[in-house]
Image (cartoon, grey):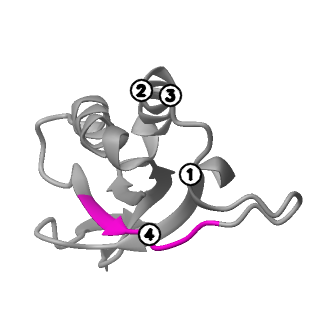
Amino acid sequence: MKCVMAVIKPFKLDEVREALVAIGATGLTVTEVRGFGRQKGHTEIYRGAEYEVSFLPKIKVEVVVADSVADRAVEAIQRSASTGQIGDGKIFVFDISQAIRIRTGETGSEAL
């Protein structure tokens, strides 16, 4: 099993969710996060004063899938989250050693 974690622009969430459901992902976790990378934030004007916003709002999407689906999940996220602009985000893939469904006690890929 693999955990595919992506940090994306907030307005791309629905497209990413639809792409993951289309490849058979049965569930995902979404977290509102803030951060910066090469984008380095930006400046805004509030009540006439200019200030720097260092941490930009992003969405972290985590989905655990079978090994056979991981490459398709990465491709689906990359395709649906891309705008071609700086700040589109990153995708990380982790190995998952075990998964357990709390309600039934199912383990491994059956727990997904």
Task: Classify 10 Å Cα crowding around label 1: few (below 14), some (14-19), many (20 and above).
Answer: some
- Which residue does the numbered mark 4 point to in the structure image? 96
Q: Label 1 near label 3: C-beta < 8 Å? A: no
**What is the secondary structure assignment of the residue under circle 3?**
loop
Q: Considering depth in this image, is 109 or 87 the residue closer to the camera?
A: 109
| Residue with the mark numbered 1 | 109
Going from N to C along the chain, the mark reached first, 2 or 4, is 2
**Identity of the residue drawn at 48% across and 57% down:** 62
- The Cα–Cα distance between marks 3 and 1, rounded to whole angstroms, is 13 Å
Label number found at residue 19? 2
Label 1 vs label 2, nearer the camera: 1
Q: Is residue 51 left or right of residue 106?
A: left
Q: Residue at x 30, y 79 (%)?
A: 54
Q: Which disc number belongs to residue 24?
A: 3
3 or 1: tag closer to the N-terminus: 3
Q: CA distance from mark 1 to mark 4?
A: 10 Å
User: Residue 71 got which mark?
Assistant: none
Which stretch appears magenta? Answer: 91-99
Does the residue at mark 1 contact the one at mark 4 (Cβ under 8 Å)? no
**Residue flagged by tag 3: what amino acid is it?**
Gly
Q: Position of residue 70 (x, y in %)?
A: 32, 45
Density class for disc 3 (Cα within 10 Å; few <14, some 14-19, many ≥20) is: few
Q: What quarter of the picture does the N terminus occupy?
A: bottom left
